[in-house]
Amino acid sequence: MSREAAQPWASGAFRIEVYEDNEFDGTLDFTIGGASTQTPSQPTNEPAIERVVTYQNLDAQGEPIDVKGEFPADTTALRAAVYVKTNAPVSVKGVWTAVNAQGVPANQILDENQVGADQENNILSFSIATQNGAPLPQGAYKLDLYIADKLLNTTAFRVNGAATQPTQPTPPAQPSAAQQFTYQGKLDVTPAWNAPGALALAPNGDLYVAESGAVRRVKQDLASVRFGESSFTQGDGKLGAAVTGIAADSQSNIWVANPLHSNIQKFSADGKFLLRFPGDDSQTYDKDGEVNQAYGVAVDKQDNVYVADTLNNRIQKFDANGKFLAKWTTLGLKSPIGITTDAQGNVYVTDTGNHRVLKLDPQGKLVMQFGQAGAGDGEFNGPWGIALDAAGNIFVTDNFNQRVQVFDAQGKFLTKFGGKGSAAGQFNKPVGILRAPSGNVYVADGGNNTVQIFAAASTGANPPGGPSSATSEGRMVADLGFRPNQDGFSFENYGGTYPKEQSDLFVEDLIRMFGEQAVCAGYQDQVCQVAPGALEFADEWNASSNQGHCYGFAVLSLLLFQGKETPQQFGATRV
């Protein structure tokens, strides 16, 4: 790893985390401005799990043959050789869990046992088998290894190659319909995606996606345009190969986290460069207002900007002009990446290196935290992107576990969806995430080079460009994405005897008909900012409704049928 233009690295400590098959394997630490050091992931005077080999058979020398956690369908036993580093006798506890296996309750503990180790006897064997010799249920299992009640290693096992998380999520014990999310399709754009990494929905109703070396603006008709200059050198409007964070302010300006250049940049809604900070390319990367490979950015209701300063392990706060306001350094962060805010000004952070999520108040005080390393419900392996919905539910992309997890406002696990793979609804390193006002969830699936769309099962909402259906009773003319609430058409039907303005369809009427999430593209000062498609719909309806709303609806339908009006005027993406 080297810096561009032969720039020296700042003095201080740096760390490389090493993963093998998505399993944390250790760290390498470096010091600049002093003697370089190399330290293992565990202190040398403490016992450590050096490695775990999953196996079925031994070779001619009696060594286990590593199967990388993948076992065939007829497997009757799972085995692991555990290599322990210790200077004194220790006891290692192994806990076997069926994470998601056929016919077995999710996350059911199957067995646990203790095995002793010392300097000479440091290769331990852990196994689990069926009692009658029948094959193990197909699915996902894990082995957690503890020393002195401290979790040091989690190893995944798959029988018949089943993904750790299935394509269709396993529901909680008594889920509500709103907690279930189903795959709806991919967001197809031209030209094709180029490593999508983060997502933001602006008040203007457009979707902005951070890609490799660029930002893409996607309009509601799916027309898209890129802006930003892909460059290896720093400069105004120049973006590195990895653009990992993006946020929109109240004016639809776009803020971009540009980690390879260690700066934050601001663009207008149409892609015009506005500012960057820090602007001095000779920065030391650790002073107030400077960032060191910052991966995440968020904007609150007052247009304050929050930055996940990843390698400095802190959060910084700036005003709308990039002026430094504050820093939060006492949270014990380790490589924070994802960041977002709620309507009350609270800040949510994915503390990626510590495998947890933090909620902070507007002054940076810790309000809540949840999560730990692992593959179970509510556990993380590299949490990355984070998003909120109107109810305060928290959506997190669990990067190395290849899934999305959903929590309520108190951090209680609700549900999960995804799984490793390239099939519909599966992920390969999910990163950015967005919960749209429509209720759809958009996930930037970086490894599969696409943006996938999921919908809550209770909404039935169709995403832009996603699947639609027409009944056998008629042909669908246009689908605006609106879905009426139950009894949504029992609004007042004003007639010609009322004043003209009383016959108009107002925002309140749209919300009563279609729901707030479908009508409001965002909020400013707690006031609904009506989506352009909804405004166009209301204008055309009002122009046709001089004899009442129901009559106006019929007239508008006739105009569409005759071709005198077009569905595209109302934001329709298909006919």
Image (tube, grey):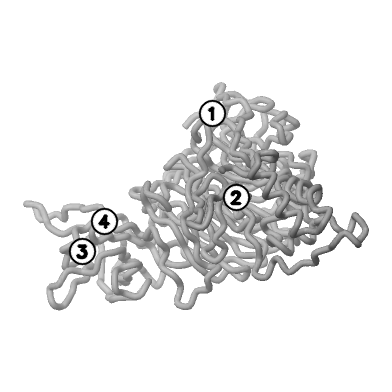
User: Mark 4 against mark 1, which lies toward the viewer?
Assistant: 4
Q: Are marks 1 and 2 in contact (CB under 8 Å)?
A: no
- Mark 1 and mark 2 lie on one chain; the one further toward the N terminus is 1
Which residue occupies 52% across, 32% down?
190
Circles 4 and 3, Cβ within 8 Å, touching? The answer is: no
Which residue is under mark 3? 79
Q: Quadrant of the C terminus?
A: top right
Residue placed most toward the observer, 575 or 75: 575
Q: Are marks 2 and 4 in contact (CB under 8 Å)?
A: no
**Sequence order check: which comes first, mark 1 or mark 3?**
1
Name the residue at the top extreme: 5
Q: Nearer the viewer, mark 4 or mark 3?
A: 4
**Marks 1/2: CA–CA distance:** 50 Å
Secondary structure under the numbered disc 3 in the rendered image: strand
Query: How far across and how far down the image is residue 565, in percent?
Result: 69, 40
Residue linked to disc 2: 479
Q: Is residue 310 above or below residue 129?
A: above
- Say which amino acid is labelled 4: Gly
Residue lying furthest right: 499
Left or right of residue 23, residue 442 in this image = right
In primary-sequence order, the first of circles 2 and 3 is: 3
Residue 277 seen in render:
no
Q: Earlier in the sequence, mark 4 or mark 3?
A: 3
Q: CA–CA distance between discs 4 and 3?
A: 16 Å
As drawn, 451 above or below 166: above
Q: Which residue is mark 4?
A: 161
Tell me the element at label 4.
loop
Q: Residues within 10 Å of mark 1 (few under 14, many from 20)?
A: few
Label number found at residue 3: 1
Crowd rating for badge 3 (residues with CA inside 10 Å; few <14, some 14–19, many 20+): some
Which amino acid is tagged 2? Asp
Q: Disc 1 marks which amino acid?
A: Arg
